Image: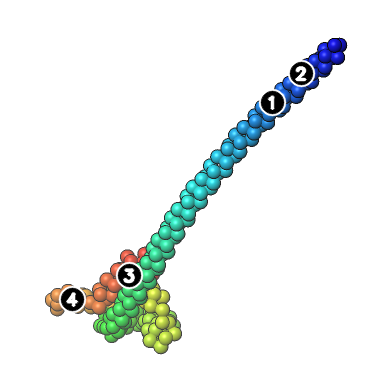
Amino acid sequence: MKALPEEKQKLILDISSRDKQILEFENKLKSQEKLTRQYFTELSKSEKLNLQQEMDARNQKESLEKQIEALKNNLDYLRSQQTRSEQNNQQKHHRQIYRYQNWIGQIENDYMAIRDSARWKTGNFVVRFLEILMFRKKQALVIDHLDQLFQEYHTGRNSDPESMMRKVANDMTDMFNSRRWKFGHCIISIVERLIFRGKTKLAADHVKGIIHEYRQITGDNLS
């Protein structure tokens, strides 16, 4: 009869031990469930973060592609503008060259008429006569340089119309400022007034008009 209480007590102890084990197991299970929930929560956050980063990267890529496309379009536009500007400058240069060539031809014809005119011949005679009286040697004249310039231009030794126009404009200006031209022009003008001849358009006036237009366009005021 004494064995029963011992068995009962042992059974109670066994049941109590198992209850503790069950409680510990439940606690471990709850802890594991908590950890699992935390894991999935962190995983979800990580997935959301990765997704957000992917979206940001995609948006950034699209923005960069748009910027690159805009830069390409801008570059193409600038290149087209540069090409158009170069073409316009080239056309303008060709027109200017043609204008110089035309002016040079006109000035050469007028120069030949001026050199053979009574004004230049009279002035040249008077000045040379005065030089002889003062025992001065004959020096090279501006017409000698002009003759050389036109010869070089036609033979190709000075085929640059822009350079040629500048030299011709300077020499013709020197010619009109020379004592020979001024004396001759003054003497012939007096004679024309004495014989009541009206003022006529001179080749020199035409040359001066061309030089004036040339200097206005180029800003070249050197004489």
What's the distance in space between the residues labelled 2 and 4, CA to CA?
145 Å
Q: Residues within 10 Å of mark 1 (few under 14, many from 20)?
A: few
Question: Can you say whether 111 is above or below 211 in the image?
Answer: below
In the image, taking residue 179 as reference, residue 197 lies left or right, namely left
Q: Nearer the viewer, residue 200 or 35?
A: 35
**Which of pointers 2 and 3 lies earlier in the amino acid sequence?**
2
Q: Report the quarter where the C terminus lies.
A: bottom left
Image color mode: rainbow
In the image, taking residue 11 as reference, residue 28 lies left or right, namely left
Per the image, label 4 sits on a secondary structure element best described as: loop
Q: Residue 200 shows which numbered tag?
A: 4
Give the number of the mark in front: 3 or 1: 1
Question: What is the residue that sits farthest to the front in this orientation?
Answer: 1
Q: Position of residue 115 (x, y in %)?
A: 30, 83
Q: Residue 26 shows which numbered tag?
A: 1
Per the image, label 3 sits on a secondary structure element best described as: helix
Label 2–label 4 contact, CB within 8 A: no
What's the distance in space between the residues labelled 3 and 1, CA to CA?
108 Å
The image quarter in which residue 32 lies: top right
What's the distance in space between the residues labelled 2 and 3, CA to CA?
123 Å
Label 2–label 1 contact, CB within 8 A: no
Q: How crowded is mark 2: few (under 14 residues within 10 Å), some or many (20 or more)?
A: few
**Residue at which label 2 appears:** 16
Q: Where is residue 99 in the image (x, y as percent from the top left)?
A: 31, 75
**Which of pointers 2 and 4 lies earlier in the amino acid sequence?**
2
Q: Position of residue 214 (x, y in %)?
A: 32, 70
Does the rendering let one see residue 221? no
Give the number of the mark in front: 2 or 1: 2
